[in-house]
Image (spheres, rainbow, N blue to C red):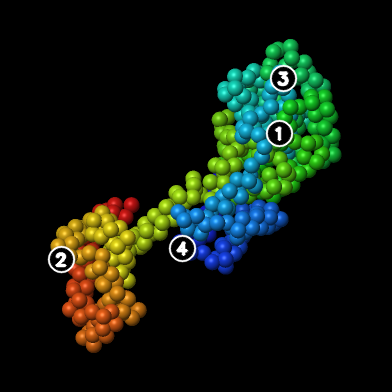
């Protein structure tokens, strides 16, 4: 769920968190991309615009704390704003089911998952809150739907109102109420008829049922995969019937997930639950914090930043390994290695990445290869032209002189570096020829 949205936003934030110090332009550019990501995820334009505006306003005035970078600060603001956009009042997953028997009216379009959700919720109320639940199908036009609810009821051990042919929905609702009172049920759920589209008859019927049942909760079930349509459906149902909360189904699919964001902002109605599959347990209460985290692909800011960093390093390492195995270890690769060594605190870190290099690492250490030496070596590589870096075989005497001078060092220093490069390249070749592929692969995983 939300994978596409989270991937897109993840990319934006990766760039942001890598950028170090942020300028106002950086923030603007990043937020433009966030906006595009939101639109692609089928968040409606006005909602995306409002969202960006809110973030921008907060980001501009925000004090940047010392412990995090400005980029992280923006991520945090985006995250908090997402939570605000998603959140509704009340505890997530809690339904008003006091004063038994409490009626719950289920409404929604046909195929939205209404009947399935009715049963999932009944099971949840029974299992988690110890409620006695009675379910009734009011879908008089589709006997199969009534049968379906009865079968699900049997499956989950929840009673259903016996089907009486020829009854109209209002009569069934009244009978459910009576039966719930007489039978000592805590909750009775009314699964209304769905239609493929919202029409007069559907609305009139649901309204009539609402008037006799006086529900404690009117839950609208909408298909999360339908994106913007889900929001339109919700707006219309709310206008005509009044809903107390929304259940978004099919959030297990690879939908664009934007519906969740727009839903709350447009309708003002809280999403109470999300459906995550066809099984009776595949229903989760809606936690704005968790969903915001999922949208951003992170549990919290710190882990996001760490992840971005790790991914970058892992990707670099993998790219380098691939090149090495092809015998393409050039000066750019060596520079990458040296920088990696600096970052990881010298040879030890590098050894852990590259088996087979242990011996050379020890030699280097013995030769006093500390940070200062590494930096000088990097300076030598920086002094080379692009062509030279890609192909060190070009380095004849005059080029060597120029490079060493450029880095303020002697040609002998450069020769040492070239020797090290040759040894590393040879080693890589040997390892891959000996079928050390598995070993190398292991090293980068
Ligand atoms: P209704 O016409 O609105 O009552 O829809 P149903 O409850 O009959 O559901 C239609 C189909 O959607 C069924 O095959 C359900 O199993 C499936 N479904 C319902 N909720 C979910 C969900 O959250 N995820 C997935 N993947 N399928 C669901």
Q: Are marks 1 and 2 in contact (CB under 8 Å)?
A: no
Q: Give the SS element for disc 3.
A: loop
Query: Crowding at label 1, few (<14), some or many (≥20) Cα neighbours within 10 Å?
Result: many
What residue did someone put label 1 on? Answer: 219
Query: Crowding at label 2, few (<14), some or many (≥20) Cα neighbours within 10 Å?
Result: few
Q: Give the SS element for disc 4.
A: loop
Residue in front for this viewpoint, 68 or 387: 68
Q: CA distance from mark 1 to mark 3?
A: 18 Å
Mark 1 or 4 closer to N-term? Answer: 4
* Residue drawn 61% across the image and 29% down it: 120
Mark 4 or 2 closer to N-term? Answer: 4
What is the quadrant of residue 240 in the picture? top right
In front of the other: label 1 or label 3? 3
Q: Are marks 3 and 4 in contact (CB under 8 Å)?
A: no
Please tell me the numbered disc located at residue 20.
4
Q: CA distance from mark 4 to mark 2?
A: 34 Å
Q: Give the SS element for disc 1.
A: strand
Point out residue 427 in the picture as x, y percentages from the top left corner: 20, 64
What residue did someone put label 3 on? Answer: 99
The reply to whether residue 71 is visible in this rendering is no
Q: Are marks 2 and 3 in contact (CB under 8 Å)?
A: no
Residue in front for this viewpoint, 122 or 65: 65
Mark 1 or 2 closer to N-term? Answer: 1
């Amino acid at each position: 769920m939300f994978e596409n949205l989270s991937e897109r936003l993840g990319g934006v934030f990766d760039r942001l968190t890598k950028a170090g110090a942020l300028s106002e332009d950086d923030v603007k550019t990043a937020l433009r991309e966030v906006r595009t990501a939101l639109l692609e995820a089928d968040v409606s334009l006005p909602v995306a615009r409002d969202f960006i505006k809110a973030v921008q306003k907060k980001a501009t005035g925000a004090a940047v704390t010392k412990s995090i970078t400005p980029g992280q600060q923006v991520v945090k603001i985006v995250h908090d704003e997402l939570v605000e956009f998603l959140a509704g009042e009340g505890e997530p997953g809690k339904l008003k089911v006091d004063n038994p028997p409490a009626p719950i009216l289920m409404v929604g379009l046909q195929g939205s998952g209404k009947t399935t959700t009715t049963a999932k919720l009944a099971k949840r109320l029974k299992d988690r809150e110890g409620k006695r639940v009675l379910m009734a199908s009011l879908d008089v036009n589709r006997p199969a739907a009534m049968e379906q609810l009865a079968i699900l009821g049997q499956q989950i051990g929840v009673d259903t109102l016996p089907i009486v042919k020829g009854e109209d929905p209002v009569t069934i609702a009244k009978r459910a109420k009576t039966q719930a009172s007489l039978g000592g049920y805590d909750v009775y759920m009314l699964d209304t008829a769905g239609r493929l589209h919202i029409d007069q008859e559907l609305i009139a019927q649901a309204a009539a049922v609402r008037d006799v049942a006086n529900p404690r909760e009117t839950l609208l079930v909408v298909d999360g995969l339908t994106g913007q349509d889900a929001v339109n459906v919700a707006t219309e149902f709310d206008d005509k019937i009044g809903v107390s909360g929304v259940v978004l189904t099919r959030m297990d699919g690879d939908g664009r997930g934007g519906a969740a964001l727009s839903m709350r902002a447009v309708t003002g109605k809280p999403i109470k639950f999300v459906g995550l599959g066809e099984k009776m347990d595949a229903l989760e209460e809606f936690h704005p914090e968790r969903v915001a985290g999922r949208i951003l692909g992170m549990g919290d800011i710190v882990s996001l930043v760490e992840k971005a960093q790790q991914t970058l390093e892992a990707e670099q390492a993998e790219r380098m390994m691939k090149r090495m195995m092809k015998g393409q270890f050039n000066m750019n690769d060596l520079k990458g290695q040296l920088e990696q060594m600096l970052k990881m605190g010298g040879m030890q870190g590098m050894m852990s990445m590259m088996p087979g290099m242990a011996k050379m690492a020890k030699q280097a250490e013995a030769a006093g290869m500390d940070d200062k030496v590494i930096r000088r070596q990097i300076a030598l590589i920086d002094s080379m032209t692009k062509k030279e870096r890609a192909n060190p075989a070009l380095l004849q005497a005059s080029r060597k002189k120029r490079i060493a001078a450029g880095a303020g060092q002697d040609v002998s220093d450069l020769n040492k570096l070239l020797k090290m490069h040759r040894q590393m390249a040879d080693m890589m070749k040997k390892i891959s020829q000996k079928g050390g592929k598995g070993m190398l692969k292991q090293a980068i995983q």
